[in-house]
Amino acid sequence: MPTRDDLQFLLLQARVEGDPMRIEEQQSFARQLAVSDEQVHGLDILATPPDDSMLQDVHAVLVGGAGDFGVVHPNDAIIQLMEFLARTASRGYPLFASCFGFQALVKGLGGTVIEDHGRAEVGTAELSCTSAAARDSLFRNLPDHFDAQVGHKDRADRLPDGAINLVESGPCPHHAIHIKGTLAWATQFHPELTGEDNRRRFENYMDEYGILFGADEAQARLNGCRPSLESNSLLRDFVELLSD
């Protein structure tokens, strides 16, 4: 098995040129995986569709957020991403996807994702493990309730066959899944982000959140960003599964 220092990750990103979150996202994943920045290779799927041949040179695929893009009304690049993730997960190839990546995997495998602005979650939220989490090789070390960084207006409405629901919240009943029999996991929340990371990202989209929640509520959610040590541990534990 490869050591932590040997592992190479392909990070699939859907972010426009100039989005400051593009580089920060790569760095955030590297930090929480506890690997060097050079081990996380970003791919702009808007310019280069992911191809199965790319898996030959990496040990796992990562997917993060998307800024201006979503899977409810996908463009061609997002459709190609969803198809790639479905193939990758079905083959049992190691995969960890968060937020937009979670939604792309759910829809790619045949589930449904809906717009639900009334249940939008932004900032830091307390989430709850389902009973299945205690039996999961990656999520079993999480406490029953934990804080995590969130930032979504869409959510999974129906999970695909073979997806085990591991985490939930009041507004969002499907917050993390494991594809049964594979090394593919996905979270609606952001284990790659700390409270400070999410605060910076929140500030980058403050105008949009002000419209969504109102200025006072958006500011209150920003002020409520706090650490999320338990959820941040997931990516390091994912590396342990790859290097055992």
Image (cartoon, rainbow, N blue to C red):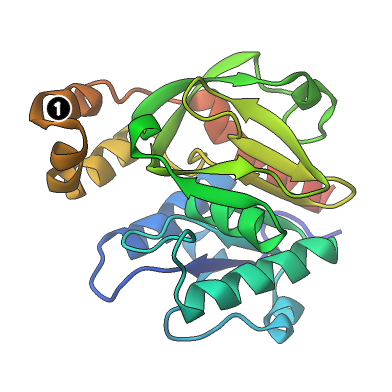
Q: Is residue 44 visible?
A: no
Front position in the image: 163 or 123: 163
Q: Is residue 12 left or right of residue 110?
A: left
Q: Is residue 105 above or below residue 239?
A: below
Residue located 52% across and 30% down the image: 172
Task: Quarter of the image for the N terminus: give it.
Answer: bottom right
Q: Is residue 137 left or right of residue 118?
A: right
Residue 33 percent coordinates (x, y): 58, 48
Q: Where is residue 240, by image quadrant? A: top right
Q: Is residue 202 left or right of residue 188?
A: left
Pointer 1 residue: 219
Q: Is residue 121 above or below residue 157?
A: above
Residue located 33% across and 59% down the image: 67
Front position in the image: 86 or 183: 86
Q: Where is residue 116, by image quadrant? A: top left
Kind of element beneath mark 1? helix
Q: Is residue 61 above or below residue 16?
A: above
Residue located 37% across and 26% down the image: 124
Front position in the image: 78 or 178: 78
Residue reaching furthest to the left: 215
Q: The residue under label 1 is which amino acid type?
A: Gln
Q: Where is residue 214, by image quadrant? A: top left
Q: Is residue 143 visible?
A: yes
Residue located 53% across and 68% down the image: 12
Residue 145 percent coordinates (x, y): 58, 14
Mark 1 Cα shell of 10 Å, populated few (<14), some (14-19), many (≥20): some
Residue 188 percent coordinates (x, y): 53, 41
Residue reaching furthest to the right: 181
